[in-house]
Every structure is written in structure tokens, then in C-alpha cells.
Amino acid sequence: MAGGIVTVASGVINPLIGKLTTLMGDEYKKFKGVRKQAPFLQKELNAMNAALHKLELIDEIDPTVKDWRDDVREMPYDMENCIDDFIRQSRADNAKGGFIKKTARCIKKLRERIRIAHQMEDLKTLALDAKARHERYAIDDWKPASGSVVVDPRLRAVYQEADALVGIDGPREEIAMRLMDTQKKIKVVAIVGFGGLGKTTLSKQVYDKIDLPFNCKAFFSVSQRPHMAELLNNFQLKLGMNSPSSSHTRKVEDMIEEIRGHLNKKRYLIIIDDVWDESSWNILKCALREDNNGSRIIVTTRLVGVASAACQNDSEGIYRLKPLNEQNSRMLFLNRIFGSEHDREISRDDLVRQWITEGLLVRNLHVTDLENLGRSYFNELVNRSIIDPCRTKYGEVLSFRVHDIMLDFILSKCDEDNFISLAHNCEDMASLHDNKYKVRRLSMRGAKYGPIIDVSLSQVRSFTQFGKFTPPPSLFKYLRIFRIEGFMESLDLTAIGELFQLRYLYVSGIDSVQLPAELQGLVYLGTLDLHDAQIKSMPSDIVSLSRLSYLRIWMETELPEFIGNIKSLRSLMIYRNKLTSDPLSNSMKVIIGLGELTNLRELKIDVGSLEKPERDALACSIGKLSNLKNLRFIGYPNEDNNQLGSLSKPFQNIEQFHGPLWKFCRVPVWMGGLHYLRILELSVEETSTEEFHVLGELPSLLELKFRSSHIPKERAVLGTGLFPVLEDFNFWSIEDVTAYLRFDEGAMPNVRTLALHNKEEWDGSIPVGMEYLLCLEKIQLHGAYSGDDAIVSAFRSALLVHPNRPSVQHWRREKGSFPAGCGGFIMQ
């Protein structure tokens, strides 16, 4: 995993070490007392961090060592809070006023500095105590006692009777069939799935069922951090090998040779359960000799990479174990899974932004873009089957869910490490007061909590609320993440301006949100996401937020003209019914200012109410955004406008262009140079075969939704080599497009979905050469096509010679009926 292990403690220790480095700089040289403590604390924290990393690799630790670890984990939180108080107090400005007011402020600041100095001394004492305990307990030398044996939680699964299992028959038969063939070469089948899904149980059932004549059989588990010598010794015992006469410790390579000798010329069946990394597999496979006598191996793992390595990248050898279907889920889990309304879809990008906010992602010499680093961590969670992909597009997972069993495990670890606390009612809140350690991250679900005492929230760094109840922000002091997902008409957030450490604000499910008059105190705010909540006005001092990188807002009135001054923005999403509210507005200043946001990677903007001068200005502005990767126009369709089409080489780094609401006169010439473009939605008044072929030469285009009001009478020939990686082709026109398309052999070699729309009656033609679209899986017919069953028959007849026999989906418009998710059409 890129960046190494991320521990619970490192998320706060790493940023804290950075702040201590800042305290040793010139900016704070006049604060001698604090600067004197900083080097000592930095040194001790580095030592503690190293020890904590080591303990993270040990599954079972002594209670005394665990107590030291938990205390050290908590210490950095208080240290960072103290330093944040100091930084805020030292940066407090001296507002104008008379002599008496200035004197009073100076006295107040002096008292605050004295208080912080005493806190720093107390923290130094705690650090010294932790250091003494570290040496006294010999933490660095501590190892688990060899006599301590933990019962393997898979033990019950291994000995589970077949008649007590649910949903096992189908997978067991399929895997057995894969193994029971006449192939003499050794065969490996890898079962992949997340923890608790039943990989061990399934592999043991297959192990018991296969009745082929094997000379020897063995079933053994690897686990997450195996000691290879002990693992190989266990493997030998499972194979029935005699124990060595020598008491000396044997080398791994010697044990491998012994196993290879034992398996010589034998036909064997071996189950290797719970392999966590490729390095373990690479060692084990050295012992599995190949004698071409029909030996079989089953490997179970949570990681797709391990499965691929075990099967030597043969995808047919990988069996992806899926969750139980609804019927079996009801039978086995009943209330646990069936009908659960809590398994919730979570956005990948939203999760990554929270990781960045928490300090769990750290830049280094090799990684400078934290969003890319976060996505690589996210992909590791997917590959390890820890989370379930939900929305995916072209191999990229965009959202996910967490399985109930995995969620229970995560919550258990969070409770053990005091990482997250949950409360569902007032009794849960009351119990938090009895915790040994302070509440740092709190998730509240529900509406009735009764009175909340300050101490429950004062040390909270991350707060999430699901429901109608929202505690006043004044109860928080060190809050960094504030998430509200409720169902309320309005929410007053005027008090958040006092949350100096706030970095992330997310509001969803609320009709109207009131922000404070000033935001300049939120110097660390990086994400302001008002998902579907409207605001009446945006504080003008938002331009002072130098770290604001993600802004999503829904404005009731016109946009502030200063929007173009927020230079730090990387993502900007503006949702509105009207971009301007009156003819005398400053909309042109707003639009021109957008061109100054040169750091933007993502822009979603409402263009529905813009007049032609404003559209021209917007085209010029967004044409300057050279780093833009995702551009989406929202609102209502516009008239023809060629200002954007006449630009010179814009969007050279664009990956997604969603422009169906911005109608071009023709296909823009500059689109032929968009070598990174993956998704394109384009609407033109008229096109030609040559212009259409320009799009066909784009090397990265995966999805094309093309709309044309008028098409040429001649048939468009899509020749060999065009659209080399396209998977989804969606063609819409007022005129009949079936007479327009012809596919030559080698065109669109990867297309899977072909969707055709029109408003005119079908003339009886169908596209020529569809049999050459070798990867085609389905054809979707919309609009006027959907009213005639004859077109479905014609398409199906034409596809009889297609090797895939693609399905033809017929969408029929129901008068007065608009089913959810179908847009007024029903698939036949």
C-alpha cells in the first residue's frame, strides 16, 4: 500500500510533529517558553510513534503494554489541542480601540499564554512519564508469550456440518466441477471474498466432497502475519510428515525441500486458507512441486492480487464469492441482513476528503497529490474485499457499502482504539461520560437525546449527525469535521465561525442553511459542501480562506462576484435555478472571475438561465482553466452557441466533458486533441461523417453520448480502428438514425452497449455491420423506436449471426405514467 501503514495514532501524531516544527520557526521566536518545549516533545513523539507502529503488527499484547499504548495514543490529542490554542491566541489581531480596551485585551492574552505555558509543562510531564514507562516495561523488546495460543475463529467453520449450512450447494458444486477435470497439469482455484463471507467454510466443504483418488490431502490456514517457519512446520504436520529428530531450529529453505521430497510423484489436494499477501504465497508455492499427475490446490484470500498470483493471472481460476441472495439471507440472518436500512452508500471521493482532513494521508517525496494517494488506499480496501463496491464505471469504484459483518468488526476496533464513539439515544450519550478516555469522534443517530453535557462534546474532533437533532456548534471547541445529514426545513450555522479548527463542513437533507456573516476565522476550512441545502447569501470574506479546495453550494440569489478570487479551489459546483436575479446584477463579473480559478480540476455550473453575452463570457472563462479534468453543464438546454466551439486548444487535460446542455453548431475542432478524454456528452446542431470520425480517433474515449439535430443523408461508415476503447455508445437524433450507421470490421472493438434514440418514425432500416461489434452485449431502443415491435424483430434477426447474441431492449413510453428511474419509459 502506498505510503506504508496508517495507524490510529499516526493520524494525529504526524500533523502534531509538523506543528511542533512550526513552533521552532522564526514566527514564534519571541515565545521562548513554548519554543523551548517543542524540540523535546517532537523527539519524544517520534520515539512513541515508532513504538506504536511496532505494536500495530502484534495481534495480542500484554495488558500492561496495552495500557501504555492506549495512554500514548490519547496524549497527542491533548498536545495538539494545546498547540492549536496557542497558535490561535498568538495570531489574534489587535482590533482598534481605546487605551482601556487595549489594556484589557493584553491582560487577557497574557493570562491565556500563562495558562497554555502551564499546559505545556503538564504535557512535558506526561511525556516524561510515558518515556519512563516505555523503558520500564521494555516496550521495544516485548514479544508475545510463546505459550499464549489464540483459538482460530475459523475453527467452527472448518468443522461445520453440511446440513447446517445455507446457500453452500451452488458454489460448492461449481468449484468442485472446476477441479474435477482430466487435466494433468496442476490446477489452482482461488476463492476471493471479504471477511466473514464463508470462504473457509466453502473450501472445507469442497475438500470433503471431492472423491478423486489423491495420495495425500492437507487443509491449513496462513493468517495475516504468519511466521513462515511455524507455518511450514504446521504444513508438514498436516501432510502427516514425521517430526524431525533434531531439536535445532530449521531454515525455511530446508523445510521447503522436505515438503517437496514428501510430495514427490504424489497426486495431492491442498487447501491453503486465508492468504493475505503475495509474498506468503510465493514462499508456499515453492513447496508445491509440479509432477503433471493431476494435483489440485484451493487458495482462499480477501485480495484479488493474491488470487491472480496464485492462478498465474488465469481469470477462469478465480471464484469470486458473493453474498447470499435474499432468500438465503432471510433464512440465515433474518433481521441481521434482510431488510436492513442501515448497509448505506458512501461516496469514495467524500471518504477520501475526510481522510485528508483527519491527517491520515501525508505528503512525501514520492506523493504530492493527496487525492490520488487516498484513491490508491481506497482501491486497496476494495482489492482486500474489506468494502463492497456499489457504483462502478469502467473499472473505477465510485461508491461503496460495508457488509454488516465487516461493519461489526470495524466498530469493535474503533471502540477498542477509542477512534469512534456511537450514540443512538440519551442512554448512550450518558455512558460516554464513564469512558476512561475522552470522546474524539462521535456519530449520533436519532432525534431524542435529552440534555447534552458540554464534556461529551468539548473534545470531539469529528462529529456526524443522522437525524433531526443537531447540537449547537458552541458545545464544540476542537471540531474539525462537522457532518449533518438530517431532515429539517432550516439549520442555523451562524455559530460555526467560532470553530477555529473546522476543516470540513457537510450538510445534506436540509432545505435552508444560514451561514455566519463572516468566515475568516475558519482559516483551516478545506471543504464546504452544502449538498442539497440552499443558502441565501455567501459571506464575502470567504476569499480569505486560503485552504478552501472543495465548494458545493446551492444559491437562492445571485452568486457573489468575488467567487473568482478563491484561488485555492480545486472543485467548484454551483447549483441554481437562475444564475442572475435581475438585469443590473454583477453576473458578468462573476463569470469573468471564474477564469481566474486556474487550480480547478472539477467544475459543475448551471447555464440554463444565461443570456448569449453571459454564455460567451463563460466560454472564454472556462477556456482558461488549463487544469480542468471534469466539466459538467447543468440546468436547461441552451440555444446554439459557437463561442466555446471556436476556442483554441482548451481543456488539454480534460477527462470528462458533460455538455449536452450546451449545443454546439458543429463538432469543435479542438476536440480532436483531447487525448485524455474518457467520457463525452456532446450536443450539436449538425454534423458530418468527417467530424464524427474525429471523435472516433480519440484514444481514451470510453463513453460517448452524441446528440445531433440534423444528420447527413449519406450513411456514416465507422471504419476499422475508430473508437478503439469505446464501451458505451449512445446516439440520439431527431431524425431516424438506423439508416445512418454502418460498422466495418474492426470498428468499435470493445463496445458493449449501443443505445439509439429518435423522434421520427422508423423507416424500416437497421445499422449495417453490427455483427462486427464482437463485444456487443445489448442494444437499447428509445423514442419512436420503442413504439414498434417490428424494429425489435428486425434487430434480433440481424443479430442471429452475432457470436454474443446481444439482447435487444425495447423501451415503451407509457402515457401519463413516469415510473421512477425509467424517465417515463418501460423496458420490454
Image (spheres, grey):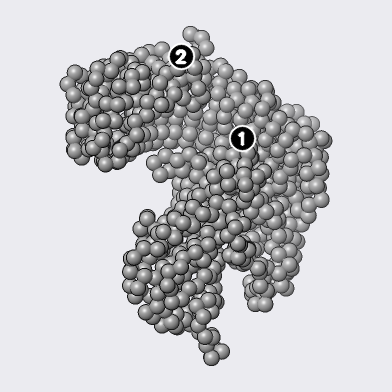
Looking at this view, name the residue that lies furthest to the bottom.
245
Q: How many marks?
A: 2
Quadrant of the rendered structure where residue 107 is?
top right
Q: Is residue 372 visible?
A: yes
Q: Residue at x 71, y 72 (%)?
A: 137
Q: Residue at x 44, y 33 (%)?
A: 602
Q: Residues within 10 Å of mark 2 (few under 14, many from 20)?
A: few
Which of 158 and 539 lies nearest the eye of the viewer? 158
Quick one: SS at disc 2?
loop
Residue 678 vertical position relative to residue 124 in the rendered view, above or below: above
According to the image, label 1 marks what residue?
505
According to the image, label 2 marks what residue?
815
Q: Amino acid at mark 2?
A: Lys
Q: Residues within 10 Å of mark 1 (few under 14, many from 20)?
A: some
Looking at this view, name the residue that lies furthest to the left.
714
Quadrant of the rendered structure where residue 88 is?
top right
Quick one: SS at disc 1?
strand
Residue 22 vertical position relative to residue 750 in the rendered view, above or below: below
Instruction: Decide if residue 52 is on the left or right side of residue 97.
Output: left
Q: Residue at x 80, y 39 (%)?
A: 426
Instruction: Decide if residue 129 is on the left or right side of residue 87.
Output: right
